[in-house]
Image (cartoon, helix red, strand yellow):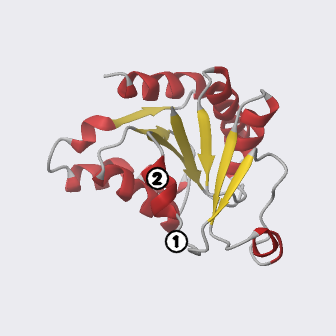
Amino acid sequence: MKIAVCGSSAITDKKTAKKAFEIGKEIAKNDILLLTGAGTGYPYEAAKGTFSNNGKVMGISPAKDEEKHINTYRFPKDVFTEIEYTGLKIPARNFPLVKEADAIIIISGQTGTLNEFTIAFHYQKPIGILKGSGGVTEILDKIADICNKNNEKDNIVYSEDPKELIQLVMNKLNQ
């Protein structure tokens, strides 16, 4: 099982960062492979949580190689057990990131996260939204209402609690 954590590349709230880390720990605890865009911010906090709990973390980098990953994008490598260098740049790497995942979790975010949400929504993947994390998470329910053609909205779960959010997403995956 693979879950992508998508969200803001900038940390604007320490409580949300702590919850992202806890989401990562829960992913590892459930023996799930964590996927991220191999960048910074809340997804990186989740990656640190997974890695700290001996879980596996795969980064889907927009860079074409390690040198560009580090020097052009200024992205980390320390908590990834594997990095796939796509060369697709941002936002094109969002497509393989979300397509590869069985489900996604969204924490805060801006336009890139909105793009990841719409890809997952279109492909009817389970989507977990960390309530209270700010950014686009504040409007995703409205977007889902507007775009809900084939009951895709039924695949979305919400929680402020990291452990509950992972459980809700896993329940959707097991339906």
- Helix, strand or loop under label 1: loop
Is residue 164 depicted above or below 62 in this figure? above
Q: Residue at x 52, y 22 (%)?
A: 164
Quarter of the picture holding the C terminus: top left
Would you identify the image quadrant in which residue 77 lies? Answer: bottom right
Q: Residue at x 43, y 34 (%)?
A: 158
Q: Is residue 4 left or right of residue 152?
A: right
Q: Is residue 23 left or right of residue 114?
A: right
For label 2, the residue is 98
> Label 1 to label 2, Cα distance in Å?
12 Å
- Where residue 117 sits in the image (x, y, percent)? 41, 54
Front-most of 169 and 102?
102
Q: Residues within 10 Å of mark 1 (few under 14, many from 20)?
A: some
The answer to whether the residue labelled 1 contacts the one labelled 2, judged by CB atoms less than 8 Å apart, is no
- Helix, strand or loop under label 2: helix
Would you identify the image quadrant in which residue 76 lies? Answer: bottom right
> Which residue is farthest bottom?
72
Of labels 1 and 2, earlier in sequence is 1
Front-most of 114 and 3?
3
Would you identify the image quadrant in which residue 51 lies? Answer: top right
Q: Residue at x 67, y 27 (%)?
A: 28
Inspect the image, locate mark 1, and give the three-letter code of the amino acid beneath it.
Pro
- Where residue 24 sits in the image (x, y, percent)? 67, 34
Q: Is residue 44 left or right of residue 134?
A: right
Inspect the image, locate mark 2, and give the three-letter code of the amino acid beneath it.
Val
Is residue 70 depicted above or below 151 in this figure? below
- Where residue 2 sits in the image (x, y, percent)? 53, 37
Is residue 112 depicted above or below 31 in this figure? below
Front-most of 22 and 120?
120
Q: Residues within 10 Å of mark 2 (few under 14, many from 20)?
A: many
For label 1, the residue is 91
